[in-house]
Amino acid sequence: MLVLLILLPLVFGAVVLLRPNAEARRWALLGTTLCLVIGAFLLGRFFTSEGGPMKGVGSFEWFPALGLSLSVGVDSVAVLLIALTLLLGPICVGASWTAIPESRARLFFGWLLVLQAAMVGVFAARDLVMFYTCFEFTLLPMFVLINEFGSTNRHKAATKFFLYTFTGSIIALAGLVYTAWAVGTRAVGVDGFTMDIATLTEHASRVLSLREQGFVLAAMLCGFAVKVPLFPLHTWLPLAHTEAPTAGSVILAGVLLKLGTYGIYRFVLPFVPVAVYEHAPAIAVLAIIGIIYAGLICWVQTDVKKLVAYSSVSHLGFCVLGLFALNSPGLTGGVLYMINHGLSTGALFLLIGFMYERYHTRDMRQIGGLGAKMPVWSTFMVFFVMASVGLPGLNGFISEFLCTMGAFVSHTPWTAGEAAQVGATWGPLGPWFGFAAGTGVIVAAIYLLTMTAKMVWGTLREPPDHADHDDDGPHLPVDLTAREIMTLAPIAALCVVFGLFPTQTLIDAVRTDINDQVAFVHQRVEEAATSAGEHLAAAEQTRTEAPGSAGNPAETVEPGVTP
Amino acid sequence: MTEKLALVWPEVWLFITTCVVMVVGLSPDLRVRRLCGWIAGIGILVAIGAAVPVEHAGGLFPAITPYAKGMIGVVGLLLLPLLAGTVDRDLDAAIAAGKARFDALRANRAEFYAFFLFSLTGLMLTASADDLIWLFLALELTSLPTYIMVTISTRGTRSQEAGVKYFFLGALGAAIFLYGFALMYGATGTTNLAEIAAAFKAQAAAGGINPIGIAGVAVALVGFCFKIAAVPMHMYAADVYQGAASGVSAMLAFVPKAAGFLAIIFICGTVGWDHGPTYDALPAPIYILLWVIAVATMFTGNVLAVRQTSVKRMLAYSSVAHSGYMLVGVIVGPGPGGSFWNNGIAAVLFYLLSYGITNVGTFAVLASIQTDSGDEADEIADIRGLHATRPWLAGAMLLCVLSLLGLPPLVGFFAKVGLFTSAIAAGEIPLVIILGVNSAIAAFYYLRIARSAYLEPADESVSTGPTPVPQRAIAAVLSASLVVLLLVVAQPIVERSVTASGYSPPEVGLAQDGPAQTLTVADE
């Protein structure tokens, strides 16, 4: 089933490339919709069927001599991200229906489908080489999309995007391969490399010394932090976002950035937990700097698309902060953030794209007060800005809240009952981290509301040379068309559902896996602290608050997230 | 002697083919002359057929010949259509138009194909070398024809300049490694590689390898740097590649490089990879030398490539950089064996194949484009907008360049990962990081090529005519499809590269009694 989700877009991509330009968008829509239907079926089966944490497992030997296989399987986090990817598929096609000139439709939609296959491959991979192959291959379609269908400065943006992420990924590859070698030779004893992610997860933290863990952490972060992007590696993102075509921005914000946080969740935390525990404060500081600094940059932007792009940097700072809080609320918040940010920011990019198609400018000094002229557009705009700001009742709130809270309570056990049980501190972050991140929420409200005020309310401002329907391109009405509303409506519906019923929908879905992950990390850190191993004893000395002194903290790992 | 003969049957077949081609190419009938290429192809196919079944060859790397000769044959077959039409095109046209009469003295076709086959013969002989003298002669046989091929490949003065440059520096390189061979002979008293290895081993066991021997190995390695276009002998690459016709440049990027790497592997095999203080490594002076050369080569190649506007010069410098990558595998050595992942020599052998194929693809695309002035495409502007006029060529360029870059899931990625993993397994973390950084630098110029060919609209000022020689476009598409196909069938090839890298160092202590006994060791 999962393999089908990877192969089907490729097949349709080939069809798009072989059929004439005029049919390209229809085939693309058919392909992505078909995938979405299969994905919905898969999602349903995933949450109703019994079985281990990994489902939909399938494997097919590729190079047995190299120990390489194409193996797929998903846990709840991966399946949700795949669902997000599949949902954005038809939406992107719909959003590009008129924006892409028909003469070049094949190139655009073909690569869009290839990109979708690669993204699903990343989330579904259970083999390190397959993961990396898909992870890296996402660069090429995105490069083509930005380079060919972006706006004025697109060549520079595409090159910068490719070089930044390629450089980071290569260094991440070194870290991942080093882990594979260490596990292969020291734990599995195969005198070589182990590429199976499950085996790696099981052994990596035990066979790597603390020093090695530090280096592996640094190497992996080179790849994943660029992708997220974490301050100070974020500089490629505003340019790429601003120049990318609408569908490209939606995919970039919606899914591609999540490859980085997913990488942190899937590899960084379980592979090198001790180093993560030790360095989490430093990374969290970077995340918080990103939250506030990018927020302040947003405030002074005049280009509305750039503003949303920087807001992604700011928002993903929360996500990273939550992940490195190393507790249940933090990790849950981080995972939820991946989904919710994909929805709300993706929708904002769609709205800006629709506006740009009509006015050919994104400069807030030239355009504004659209509330009177485009009421439907403005309604959606306000709605998604609210979701993005984190208005309770919409989807952004719960994830932002959980991330901040995760950081805030990181050093204490989660529930009162556990506090009595354990009576000690544990996690790497603390209230000050939560507090500092919380100021970012205020900054977010400032810049997003300022933007909304300029764009929606006030007197109508239009570019001086703009006259309605003077385009050579397709004839667009003043306000949104039914097709455009169709692309936004499902996202809006999900925002409301996830906002009103976060526990029943998202949190329950990921609870078991998150708790397992947290338990795993905690257990390994404890183990390292109590282990008699030489390097681990040294590790204990270097930690200011050794978890070994924390009594019985292995019990801290079954928190229920019921906000 | 008869065993040796069994080993060199592929070379014998190639040589016979060469003789046939030399005669056929002088026929006054154009149709007969045109058979040259086909005959050469059949000869190479027969040579592959003769090479692959050979199982055991003796020497330090007993199993290397089937893989190496198979690889040489495959890339040779790809080069053949690419070389089509390099010489005599004007002459044939003039004869067809009745303006000239066929003159065997002025026609170059016979020599051109014959020299190509001679060079391949030399390369295959290099793969079967088990003796310093053999190795030297084989390397010279590989290189000497290429000097002439460079010079006659186009009618312009640039080719002549390139040929002269290439020849003088080549002669210098040959002199240097011959000097190294002499020193090795002086230190061990034998020219047989296995015996040298045994002697070195005995010396190492008795307190240290003779410094003269080490110096000989080091000097020989520096000499080989010319063949693989590595720092400090890389200067010629850009000028020569640019001056020669694209087909010949593609050949220069593979044939001497493969010869050089085989020679480097053999010569490093004589000292062995078991000298390091903490892990298995080459003796310290050799290790440091290769380390410095590898790092300098990677950086020089990539940084200079970034600054080029000519695609051929860019590819020339990238070829320099690729030599640097492969040297990492040589430094690592065969490792504990068994798996591809920790075997540096297997990684180098696989990389050579992957590089050879993709490299033919890129040059073949250039060779298939003719600018208005009648030259082959060279400047980056010449390939701009290729996707609109010739989508297949643009696709081939894209695939080959991305494979050179090492973008997964193309074959170049797996080759590079082989180098990565083997270096990690040997503890060469700094080399891995440098390799990674260089791959990233390389992305910059490879992307420029890919973008120009595949995405950008054509320059108004540059217009290109139809493909002059259709065979070249076939070579391009064939190479690109092999880049994809290799992913599916990589399993047996990777297995073979692992087998081929099998290193059988002589046993310690056997050498002290004299060469007679070590011979038996080598033969076993």
Image (cartoon, coloured by chain):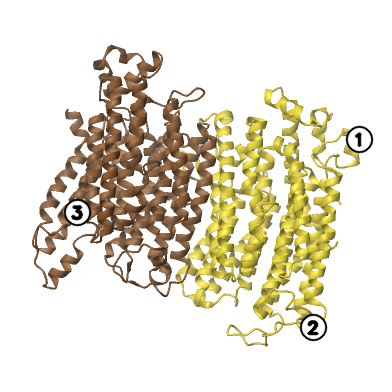
Q: What is the quadrant of the N terminus of chain A in the image? A: bottom right
> Residue B519, labelled with which disc?
none
Cα–Cα span, label 1 and label 2: 58 Å
Determine whether label 3 and label 1 are within 8 Å by CB.
Answer: no
Q: Is residue B307 above or below residue B351?
A: below
- Judge whether residue B24 can be spotted in this image: yes
Question: Which mark lies nearer to you, 3 or 1?
Answer: 3
Q: Is residue A362 above or below residue A420?
A: below
Between residue A104 and residue A29, name the one nearer to us: A104
Q: Earlier in the sequence, mark 1 or mark 2?
A: 2
Cα–Cα span, label 3 and label 1: 88 Å
Chain ID for label 3? B
Chain letter for yellow? A
Chain letter for brown? B
* Circle 3 residue: B112
Asked if marks 2 and 3 fall on the same chain, the answer is no
Determine whether label 2 and label 3 are within 8 Å by CB.
Answer: no
Q: Position of residue B172 (x, y in %)?
A: 28, 39
Disc 3 packing (10 Å; few <14; some 14–19; many ≥20): many
Amino acid type at image mark 1: Ala
> Residue A372, labelled with which disc?
2
Image quadrant assignment for residue B5 = top left
* Circle 1 residue: A420
- Tell me the residue at 78%/63% (across/down): A388
Cα–Cα span, label 2 and label 3: 77 Å
Amino acid type at image mark 3: Phe
Amino acid type at image mark 2: Ala
Disc 1 packing (10 Å; few <14; some 14–19; many ≥20): few
Chain ID for label 1? A
Q: Secondary structure at mark 2?
A: loop
